[in-house]
Image (cartoon, coloured by chain):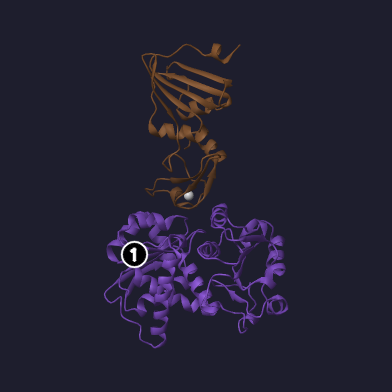
Chain colours: A purple, B brown
Amino acid sequence: MRAWQGRDVISILDFTRDELEQLFAAAEEMEEKLSRGKPPRLLEGRIVALAFFEPSTRTRLSFEAAVKRLGGETIGFSGEEATSLAKGENLADTIRMLDSYADLIVMRHRYEGAALYAAEIAEHPLINAGDGRQHHPTQAMLDLYTVRKLFGTVDGLVYGVLGDLRYGRAASSFILSLTLYRPSKVYLISPRLLRVRPEVRMVLEESGVRFVETESLEEVLPELDVLYVTRIQRERFPDPQEYEKVRGSYRVTLDLLERLAKPDLKVLHPLPRVDEIDYRVDGSRYAAYFLQARLGVPVRMALVSLVLGVWP
Amino acid sequence: MSGRQLLVERIRDGTVIDHIPAGRALIVLRILGITGREGLRVAVVMNVESRKLGRKDIVKIENRHLSPEEVNKIALVAPTATINIVRGYEVVEKRKVELPETLENVLRCTNPTCITRKPREPVKPRFRLVSRRPVRLQCIYCGSIIDERDVLEQLVSGSG
Ligand SMILES: [Zn+2]
């Protein structure tokens, strides 16, 4: 097992299952300390740079909360500020600047590979909070942690990943993360146009995980233990009518779940959602996406502490 | 007429690239930037019989030696090629081309939103070899996979 301290977090595939178990053990302790209202001030005197070149609210706030709960400080920018910054200088120079101010950089960027490139430049560790359509490793970490919490294990379950599997980085990262475990089966549910990219399929094939690509949610829903829902964006479809059809057939409603799903099925979603999950599902036994969002903070507290070498 | 009779006279000093897959000799010349206007003596033999390949192409270039980068590019389009270095009419060295596990600065990533395509960033495109035959390479930055068709397109148009 590699040491956590000083490590960059670029892709979920940079980690082994044992390493993730270490992370989850730390997250459990963080969760427990949070619930007692006494998170340890492990990051006192530390500065974390939050560099969101692409606007984000949820992931940025989740990191910010994680750092502040541990007594650390954050600097950074998001959205518009990043755009004006980008006009003046290249990414490499911005990263050098942040690297000189902070102990850790958390970064989101719309170019694939931006995080790896920035990590090559920065001396301090760097956490990828999303690079284009490619990776979103901390989302995958909290997704696995949520499944593990709900079912006691990630292994042996039947998963359905629904939506935009081609351009959606959360879906791709979750699918990749499952190859580190032994799921019973993974259904990749999407319109043909939005199936997983060749490099993701290559990892699936090499891993030996049983996976099936399908266009129909209804056909596979009765088998699922976990349904991971992601948004399908209108812009992906050249034909607006085709988009409407897809949107309709992939909408997760309470009626659909009650009719076809196992009673213990759990629905996950990286959020924010638009209307791909009906609001009536929110209060039902199936909804796990609010829990999932909440668990983002302890998982990120654990991750930042491990990478900065202040835990255990 | 046999392949042997077609072979033009031996060169004194230079490089003989043998066992090029039939039909790819001109691509090899393109990769090396040889147009004929350099004044080098060049012989191109195409579609001759080969025990190993059935048919093959051969390129002979006088007074020209190849850089390691050029050898890598040739390996991409002609993985079967052998390179003979000739001095004083004798073959002094014979090597097979071999694709390295990582390839830097030879090809451009085909993904327009890959960080290696972003203007003003000092980043060299780097690929990891996924498969030798057929050639498949993966961009280490964005993960995109490029295949033989992409490779040929780039190397032949000279934008690699
Ligand atoms: Zn790339």
Left or right, residue A253 beside residue A37: right
Residue at image coords 61%, 81%: A282
Say which residue appears at 43% left-offset and 68% top-offset.
A20
Residue B92, picture quadrant: top left
Up-down: is A271 above or below A131? below
Residue B116: x and y, percent? 44, 49
Q: Is residue B87 above or below residue A94?
A: above
Q: Position of residue A295 (x, y in %)?
A: 47, 77
Q: What subunit carries mark 1?
A: A
B143 in relation to A209, above or below: above
Does residue A241 appear to the left or right of A71 in the view shown? right
Q: Nearer the viewer, residue B129 or A151?
A: A151
Q: Which residue is mark 1?
A: A3
Task: Name the secondary structure under disc 1.
Answer: loop
Q: Amino acid at mark 1?
A: Ala
Residue B91 lies, in percent from the top left, at 40, 19
- A264 on left or right of A126: right
Q: Quadrant of the C terminus of chain A?
A: bottom left
